[in-house]
Image (spheres, grey):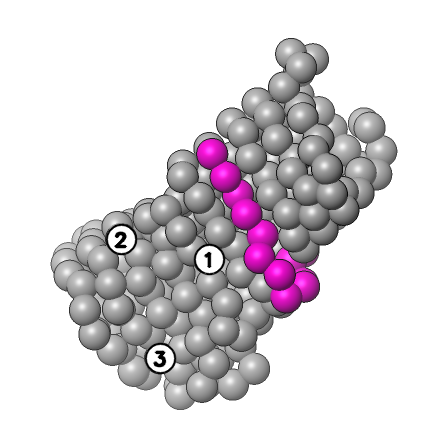
Amino acid sequence: ALGDVAMAGGFLRLDTGGGDKTFDTLTISGGDLEGADNVDVTGLTTFNGGDMSGSGTTTAVGGLTMDTNSTKDLRDSRILVNATGQTATWSDGSLNVVGDAEFHNAATAITDISADGHAISSTGTFDNDGTVNIDLSDNAQDFFIWVGNFEHDGALNVNTGRLNLDSTNASYGASSTVTGAAGTTIQFGFGTHAFAAGSNLSGALVEIDSGTIDVDGDWS
């Protein structure tokens, strides 16, 4: 492993043909990690600013944190993975997934979101195979899933707050659930949302303001 890597600016280009890289920890508050090489981070990945770009995959093997009020960008076809069995803590700031970039919450991974008023947005993909928990400061606060493609095959739990599902194309797989606790809101404001047979949506308040919702699953 390369050890602890901290970026506050500049460019770290990992496409030298030297193969995939392993870091002990990775902290990005500015600059651009770019290139085609894959990066495995065995300890904590902290993504608080700057960009990850290129065609490589960054896998947070030891957990992921996003906790400052700044925008983070995934660009090109970069994939950021919250690895199987790990927890991502997203308490502040927005994440842009631009172009063909993707944020992937892997099977059995957990992403805990408490970032009031922020979003995962732009033209890329949010792929959830694990569990996403929305725990905002109160039920008047919003979080937005506003991407080109939302691929949901896990659990999405709105425990506190208002979740705005505004993706251009959203698919909810046969084993997926979307659950809103008492006092919360699940809002459809844009795009096409396809709920497969076997999927389930339940919530205290479901608002449909725009878009198309195709339901082959169970709404209860």
Give the residue at x 39% y 44%: 124
Residue ID for mark 1 = 120
Q: Label 2 crowding class (10 Å Cα cut-off): few <14, some 14-19, many 20+? A: some
- The rendered magenta stretch, by its main secondary structure, is classed as loop
- Which quadrant of the rendered structure holds the N terminus? top right
Residue 76 in the figure: left or right of residue 33: left
Residue lying at the far top in this picture: please name it.
Answer: 17
- Hey, what amino acid is under mark 1? Ile
Give the residue at x 40% y 51%: 122
> Which secondary structure, mark 1?
strand
Q: Nearer the viewer, residue 90 or 32?
A: 32
Residue ID for mark 3 = 185
Q: Quadrant of residue 36?
A: top right
Give the residue at x 74% y 28%: 22
Residue 171 is situated, as x and y percent measured from the top left of the image, at 27, 50
Which stretch appears magenta? 61-76
